[in-house]
Amino acid sequence: MKIAVLPGDGIGPETTRAALAVLAAAGEAFGFSPELTEHAFGGNAIDAHGDPFPDVTRAALGGADAVLKGAIGGPIWDVGAIRPEQGLLALRAELGVYANVRPIRRWTTKLTSPLREDLVDGLDFIIIRELTGGLYFGPKELTDETGMDTCRYSVEEVERVCRYAFDLARERRGKVCSVDKQNVLSSSKLWRRVVTERVAPDYPDVELSHQLVDSMAMKLVEQPAAYDVIVTENMFGDILSDLAASISGGIGLAPSSSLGAQRPGLYEAIHGSAPDIAGRGIANPTAMILTVAMMLRDLEQPAAAAAIEQAAIHALEHGPTTPDLGGTASTDDIGAAIAARLADHEVTT
Ligand code: NAD
Ligand code: IPM
Ligand code: MN
């Protein structure tokens, strides 16, 4: 199991360190030994190499089974000619990871949601965000007078990510909600046509619904438990997933995987580098730890993945927790507590 680790910037390295402690403990408890290599990526790579995705890092990803990435970016790189985020888009494109899988679960009823309890009871859906097309990657232009981004999708780009969503729905509750803005955007008209005419007919057992993205934001607040699989284009998925993470209990809890036709997949939390709390050792590493669980499931270690999730839920229910969840523990405390529970697992099985 070869894992390329990109610790990133801000709380990236802090949360990654805690997640790696959990990965090491899982390896010991379940009898596998991950081979880890660390590489510059993001703002730190701009500082060291003048490039957020330098060739040395690019070259190292080829032989990896998975890429585990901490959050990148921060105010000190916001003013430069080249930004850390450009490296992230280049990485996603290079790996061809078109399906960004963002599970949104109420991991435990102990979590406080900004929404009323009866609204989030049973919350369990997955956002499939298209990740290598749309506004992020279309032609761009910036002059003194105008700025332009282009949202462009091909039939093939829409079809493959929607097929991923339908396949996933088959393993779950059999419902897909496709989110678009087809009342205005041509790219969304294409999106709706492809999902309806080219994909859905192959899945008569899956129930397809459509929702315009503006009213979807409303629906996610008013009846989030109604959803199973949500599939949408890149930018809409970015926005809706932070909202979804928040209502499930907090942005520090939401993991993700990004998958393409082949390995390596890319594994990252959905939150950012949190410049407001970086360097204080108080970031919540749960999202990165649950991201490691997603990675291990894809690397055929389902028992280890499940044990990590159980241990993370135990910590959410009984502590320790970080300040975002009302606790006083540090980032490393959470990693150590979850790692220790996995070590106990070794003794009891
Ligand atoms: P952010 O997610 O970094 O922070 C938003 C808020 O959530 C902040 O108050 C932060 O303290 C809090 N938060 C986020 N993660 C947390 C955690 N694990 N534990 C506790 N609190 C947490 O979003 P932002 O402030 O809009 O962006 C900051 C930087 O991160 C930007 O440069 C942005 O481009 C970058 N970013 C990177 C990624 C990535 O690498 N995948 C994702 C999102 C944003
Ligand atoms: C995310 C982030 C990134 C995105 C940024 C940092 C480029 O917000 O992974 O959700 O917009 O995809
Ligand atoms: Mn985002």
Image (tube, rainbow, N blue to C red):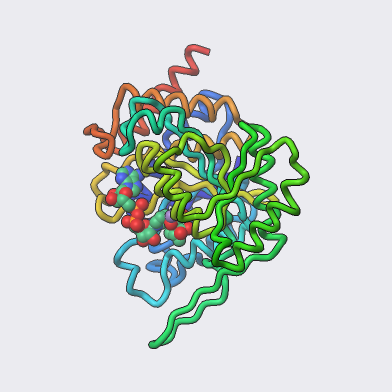
The answer to whether any part of residue 41 appears in the image is no
Q: Quadrant of ligand 2?
A: bottom left
Q: Residue at x 49, y 40 (%)?
A: 291
> Which residue occupies the extreme left position in the image?
328
Q: Could you say which quadrant of the image residue 78 lies in? A: bottom left
Does 86 appear above or below 338?
below
Q: Please state, as top left, top right, bottom left or bottom right, where the N terminus lies in the image.
A: top right
* Towards the viewer: 304 or 134: 134
Q: Could you say which quadrant of the image residue 234 lies in? A: bottom right
Residue 40: % across, % down: 45, 59
The answer to whether any part of residue 180 appears in the image is yes
Q: Could you say which quadrant of the image residue 344 lies in? A: top left
Q: Residue at x 53, y 67 (%)?
A: 135
> Which residue occupies the extreme right position in the image?
202
> Which residue occupies the extreme top position in the image?
348
Left or right of 111? Residue 165 is right
Does 141 appear above or below 266?
below
Does 165 appear above or below 52?
above
* Towards the viewer: 83 or 136: 136
Q: Residue at x 49, y 18 (%)?
A: 346
Residue 299: % across, % down: 62, 37
Does 90 appear above or below 26?
below
Residue 210: % across, % down: 59, 49
* Towards the viewer: 78 or 62: 78
Instruction: Count all numbered tags in the image, as a single digit.
Output: 0
Q: Residue at x 68, y 35 (%)?
A: 170
Residue 175: % across, % down: 62, 38
* Towards the viewer: 267 or 155: 155
